[in-house]
Image: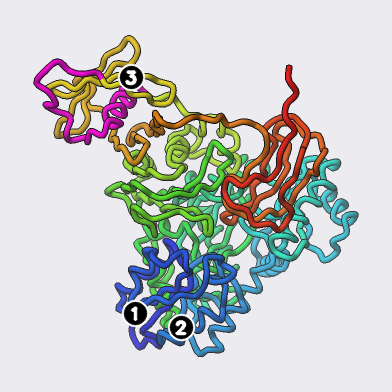
C-alpha cells in the first residue's frame, strides 16, 4: 500500500472472517488487532493477531455489538482503521459514523450507502429509479392487513411476504392461496417484530423455479465494477449451504446484463468497497436476461467471497484495504476475467437429520483435507459453543472446469475428519453428489425436495464395522500386526446393535460379523480388508470410535458398569442452551405428537420444540424470556394411561 493513512488495522469481528482479514493484513505489512469476548479468549483469531483486546462477556450484545468497547480498543492499540468483517456491526450505519467521528477509517461503504440499501422497500424503489429490474410487488407505507391482502391479490398468488428489515430468512413467509395470507402475514410480522423491532413487510411475486444468483461488485465511491457472479441457490432454512462461481448455465448475454445492472445499483448509492447485489432468477426457461430481478444488496464482504477470489485471482480483502486507504480501483473491468470453476461448502456443527439444529461440543479430532482452501477459526481441541454461529470451516476447491471442481469437492469432503460434535459433513457430501446439483439444474427448492435422500443414513459397510471394531479395542491404525504367537483370543465388541468379535493374528486381525469373517490388516497404503484397500480411517476418542473417509460413522462404546434408564417421553427438554421466545401451551392442554410447544432461540436461529407424543401437559416450567441450559426440563406431560 502506498501513502496509506493507517498502519494498524482492528478487526471488529471473530471467527473465520477475522482470521481471513488478519491473514491479508499481515501480508500487506499492517499490524492486526483482534478483539475478543470471554468465550473467545483462546480463539485462533486472537492467537494470529499482533495484539488483542478483551471487549466483554460471551453474549454478542455485551461484546461484539458494543460500539464503545470496540472504539476503546482501537484507541488503546493505536488502530487507524477498522474492518467490520460480516455480521455483527458490519452493516450498522451508526457504527460507521462512530468510527469516522473518532477520526478512523471504516473499511467498507459509507453510512449513507448502508442506509440506502438497509431497508428492502426503500432499496427497491431506489433500484427501480436506477434502472435495475425488481420483482413485481408492493413496497408501500400502508401496512394495514386489508391493503396488503389487496396487493397480494393484484400481484397474483403465490406471493412472498418479507420483513422490510429482514435477513437470514427471518420474517419471511409464503402464501400460496388467498385463504393462507392472513395467517402467513401475522406469522411474518411477529417474527420480524421479535428479530428486528420492525414488523413492516413487503409483498413480492413468488418465482416458481427460483435461482439465487448474486454479483460481486466493488466501488471506490465514484465508480464501480463487477467481479462476475456466484450461484447461491442451494439453501436450507434460507441459509446458503454450497456456493459456486461462475453460475452453471450462465450465458455471456445474461452475465453482461446482470453485471451491468449490479454496477448501476452500486453506483446509484456511491458505493465504496466490496458489496454483493443479489438477484432472484426465474430458471423455468433457462437463464434469460429478461428473467432476473433485484432482491437486495449486502453492503459488506460475503461469506462466499472465496469462490470469486478463486476464479478471478483477486484478493478482495486486499482490494478493500487499498480502496479504504484512498487508492483508486485496483483494476479496470476489462482486466478481469474468469478462470476455471470454484465451489464452496459450509461445514457446520449441526444435526442435518434433526432439522439442521445447531450442535455444540469439543473438536476432539479435526483433520482438514489437503489441496483445498480452508477458511476456519478452529483447531483440534477447540469448542463449538452456543454463543455464536456454529460454522466450523468453509471448504473451497478450484478446478479447470465444473466437473473437476465437483470431483475435488468430493475428495475434500471425504478427507475431512471431525469428531466431538455432530456435523453436516455427510449431508454436504450427499448434496454435492446428488444428480440435480451435478447436472447444474439447481434452484432454491432443491434441498427441500431431496431432503429425505440427503439426510438418509446408509447402514455401515462390513469393512467399516470391521475397522471400527479393531480401533475400538484401542489399536492404532499403524499397529495392526504381529499381536501374538499363540492361539488368538476373541475380544467381543458391540457397535450400536451389531455384535462383533476380534481376534488378533500375526498378520493383523480376524473380525467376526455374524456368520462372516473378515481379515483386517495394515499396509503403507492404509487399512486392508480381505486383501483390498479400504478408503477409510478410524480412531478411538474417549468412549467413542469413529470411521472417516468414503463413509463416516460413529459409535458410542457401551460402559459395562453403566445402567440404562431409558429415554422416556414424559416431557420436553432443551436440546441446547438458549432463550425461550414463546410458550404456546399451558398446563392442562391436550397436545399431539409433533405439535409445536416451545420456541427456543439459540446460535442465531429459532427452533421449534415439538411434543414427543400425544398427551396432556402436566406442568410448564418456563416462560418467554427465560434463559435455559441444555437438558433443562421445559415441561412435563401426564403419564401415559396403562393399556
Residue 197 pos. (x, y %): 73, 65
Q: CA distance from mark 3 to mark 2?
A: 60 Å
Out of 350 and 582, give the one closest to the viewer.
582
Q: Would you place residue 151 above or below residue 320 in this image? A: above
User: From the viewer's perspective, is the residue at label 2 or at label 1 nearer?
Assistant: 2
| Residue 102 horizontal/vertical position (percent) | 53, 89
3D distance between C-alphas at marks 1 and 3: 57 Å
Using the image, determine if residue 333 lies above or below residue 459.
below
Report the mark closest to the observer, 3 or 2: 3
Disc 1 and disc 3 in contact, CB within 8 angstroms: no
Circle 2 is placed at which residue position?
Answer: 74
Mark 3 secondary-structure assignment: strand
- Circles 2 and 1, Cβ within 8 Å, touching? The answer is no
Which portion, as a residue range, is magenta? 461-490
Query: Is 343 left or right of 638, judged from the image as shown?
Result: left
Q: Residues within 10 Å of mark 3 (few under 14, many from 20)?
A: many
Whole-angstrom CA distance, mark 2 to mark 1, is 12 Å
Q: Nearer the viewer, residue 30 or 243?
A: 30
Q: Earlier in the sequence, mark 3 or mark 2?
A: 2
Q: Is 510 included in the stretch rendered in magenta? A: no
Q: Quick one: quadrant of the C terminus?
A: top right
Q: Position of residue 449 (x, y in %)?
A: 59, 34
* Residue at numbered disc 3: 500
- Label 1 crowd (10 A; few <14 / some 14-19 / many >=20): many
Q: Nearer the viewer, mark 1 or mark 3?
A: 3
N-terminal of the two: label 1 or label 3? 1
Which mark sits nearer the N-terminus, 2 or 1? Answer: 1
State which quarter of the image contains the N terminus.
Answer: bottom left
> Is residue 272 positioned above or below 17 on the image?
below
Under circle 1, the secondary element is strand
Above or below, comparing residue 491 to residue 327 in the picture:
above
Report which residue position mark 1 lands on.
31
Amino acid at each position: 500500500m502506498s501513502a496509506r493513512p493507517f498502519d494498524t488495522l482492528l478487526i471488529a469481528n471473530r471467527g473465520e472472517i477475522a482470521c481471513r482479514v488478519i491473514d491479508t493484513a499481515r501480508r500487506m505489512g499492517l499490524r492486526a488487532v483482534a478483539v475478543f469476548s470471554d468465550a473467545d479468549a483462546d480463539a485462533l483469531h486472537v492467537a494470529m493477531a499482533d495484539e488483542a483486546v478483551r471487549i466483554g462477556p460471551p453474549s454478542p450484545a455485551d461484546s461484539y455489538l458494543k460500539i464503545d468497547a470496540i472504539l476503546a480498543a482501537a484507541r488503546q492499540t493505536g488502530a487507524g482503521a477498522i474492518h467490520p468483517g460480516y455480521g455483527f456491526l458490519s452493516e450498522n450505519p451508526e457504527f460507521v459514523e462512530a468510527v469516522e467521528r473518532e477520526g478512523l477509517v471504516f473499511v467498507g461503504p459509507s453510512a449513507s450507502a448502508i442506509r440506502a440499501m438497509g431497508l428492502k422497500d426503500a432499496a427497491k424503489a431506489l433500484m427501480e429509479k436506477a434502472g435495475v429490474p425488481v420483482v413485481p410487488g408492493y413496497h408501500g407505507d400502508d401496512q394495514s392487513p386489508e391493503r396488503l391482502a389487496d396487493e397480494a391479490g393484484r400481484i397474483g398468488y403465490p406471493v412472498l411476504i418479507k420483513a422490510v428489515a429482514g435477513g437470514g430468512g427471518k420474517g419471511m413467509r409464503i402464501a400460496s392461496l388467498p385463504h393462507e395470507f392472513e395467517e402467513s402475514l401475522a406469522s411474518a410480522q411477529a417474527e420480524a417484530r421479535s428479530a428486528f423491532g420492525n414488523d413492516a413487510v413487503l409483498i413480492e411475486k413468488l418465482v416458481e423455479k427460483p435461482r439465487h444468483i448474486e454479483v460481486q461488485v466493488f466501488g471506490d465511491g465514484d465508480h464501480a465494477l463487477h467481479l462476475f457472479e456466484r450461484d447461491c441457490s442451494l439453501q436450507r432454512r434460507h441459509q446458503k449451504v454450497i456456493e459456486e462461481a461462475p453460475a452453471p448455465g450462465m450465458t455471456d448475454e445474461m452475465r453482461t446484463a446482470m453485471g451491468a445492472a449490479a454496477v448501476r445499483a452500486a453506483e446509484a448509492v456511491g458505493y465504496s468497497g466490496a458489496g454483493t447485489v443479489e438477484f432472484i432468477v426465474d430458471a423455468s426457461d433457462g437463464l434469460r436476461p429478461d428473467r432476473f430481478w433485484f432482491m437486495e444488496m449486502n453492503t459488506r464482504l460475503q461469506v462466499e467471497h472465496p469462490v470469486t477470489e478463486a476464479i478471478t485471482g483477486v484478493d478482495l480483502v486486499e482490494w478493500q484495504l487499498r480502496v479504504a486507504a484512498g487508492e483508486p480501483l485496483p483494476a479496470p473491468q476489462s482486466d478481469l476475467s474468469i478462470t476455471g470453476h470454484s465451489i464452496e461448502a459450509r461445514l457446520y456443527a449441526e444435526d442435518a437429520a434433526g432439522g439442521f439444529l445447531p450442535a455444540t461440543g469439543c473438536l476432539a479430532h479435526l483433520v482438514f483435507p489437503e489441496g483445498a482452501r480452508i477458511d476456519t477459526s478452529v483447531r483440534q481441541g477447540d469448542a463449538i459453543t452456543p454463543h455464536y454461529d456454529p460454522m466450523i470451516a468453509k471448504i473451497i476447491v478450484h478446478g479447470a472446469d465444473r466437473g473437476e471442481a465437483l470431483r475435488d469437492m468430493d475428495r475434500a469432503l471425504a478427507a475431512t475428519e471431525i469428531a466431538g460434535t455432530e456435523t453436516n459433513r455427510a449431508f454436504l457430501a450427499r448434496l454435492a453428489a446428488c444428480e440435480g446439483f451435478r447436472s447444474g439444474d439447481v434452484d432454491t427448492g432443491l434441498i427441500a425436495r431431496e431432503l429425505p435422500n440427503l439426510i438418509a443414513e446408509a447402514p455401515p459397510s462390513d469393512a467399516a464395522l470391521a475397522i471400527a471394531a479393531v480401533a475400538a479395542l484401542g489399536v492404532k491404525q499403524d499397529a495392526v500386526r504381529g499381536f501374538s504367537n499363540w492361539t488368538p483370543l476373541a475380544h467381543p465388541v458391540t457397535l450400536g446393535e451389531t455384535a462383533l468379535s476380534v481376534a488378533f493374528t500375526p498378520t493383523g486381525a480376524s473380525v467376526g460379523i455374524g456368520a462372516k469373517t473378515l481379515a483386517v490388516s495394515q499396509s503403507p497404503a492404509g487399512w486392508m480388508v480381505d486383501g483390498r484397500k479400504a478408503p477409510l480411517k478410524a480412531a478411538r476418542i474417549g468412549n467413542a470410535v469413529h470411521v472417516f473417509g468414503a463413509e463416516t460413522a460413529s459409535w458410542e462404546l457401551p460402559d459395562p458398569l453403566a445402567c440404562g434408564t431409558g429415554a422416556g417421553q414424559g416431557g420436553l427438554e432443551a436440546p441446547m442452551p438458549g432463550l425461550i421466545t414463546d410458550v404456546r401451551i399451558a398446563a392442562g392442554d391436550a397436545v399431539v405428537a409433533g405439535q409445536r410447544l416451545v420456541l427456543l432461540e439459540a446460535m442465531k436461529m429459532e427452533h421449534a420444540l415439538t411434543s414427543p407424543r400425544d398427551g396432556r401437559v402436566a406442568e410448564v416450567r418456563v416462560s418467554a424470556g427465560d434463559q435455559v441450559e441444555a437438558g433443562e426440563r421445559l415441561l412435563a406431560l401426564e403419564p401415559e394411561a396403562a393399556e
